Amino acid sequence: MRSVYIPLRNSEEEVRVCLDQLPRDASDILDILKARQAPLDLWLIIAESLNNFDKFWRKEIDEHYADVRYERIAILNALGAYYSYLGKIETKQREKEEHFIMATQ
């Protein structure tokens, strides 16, 4: 079972998140990540496990990690790759174009 550990702020304790048992509704996980000010690499791992690179995650990362430059670049690269892949496999032309537009934003 794949897991990540989110460190608690000002503590040596951690919250364990099982990546194989993540809920479809990511709001609880997102609340934990924000409250614990989890490192962005954990955000990326969880987002990849959820297959959930939507605008919701982008907004939260922009708000809470505006000064974390290099990790945000990794997130943006992953988002671009994710939407490029969706555009590549999509068969409907309109949706294909929307995915490629998202990849460049």
Image (cartoon, rainbow, N blue to C red):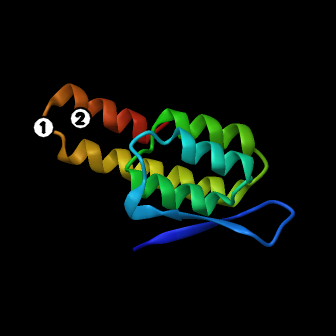
Whether residue 53 sits left or right of residue 66 in the image: it is: left
User: As drawn, which residue projects farthest toward the right?
Assistant: 10
Residue that mark 2 sits on: 96
Residue at (50, 33) in percent of width and height: 55
Q: Which mark identifies residue 78?
A: none
Quick one: 60 or 29, which is closer to the camera?
29
Residue at (39, 58) in percent of width and height: 21
Residue 96 image position (x, y, % from top left): 23, 35
Up/down of 97 relative to 67, above or below: above
User: As drawn, which residue projects farthest toward the left?
Assistant: 91
Residue 53 image position (x, y, % from top left): 45, 44
Q: Amino acid at mark 1?
A: Thr
Residue 5 image position (x, y, % from top left): 61, 68
Residue 24 image position (x, y, % from top left): 38, 43
Whether residue 52 sits left or right of residue 74 in the image: it is: left
Residue at (60, 63) in percent of width and height: 41
Of marks 1 and 2, which one's residue comes earlier in the chain? 1
Whether residue 19 sits left or right of residue 5 in the image: it is: left
Q: Residues within 10 Å of mark 1 (few under 14, many from 20)?
A: few
Q: Secondary structure at mark 2?
A: helix
Residue that mark 1 sits on: 91
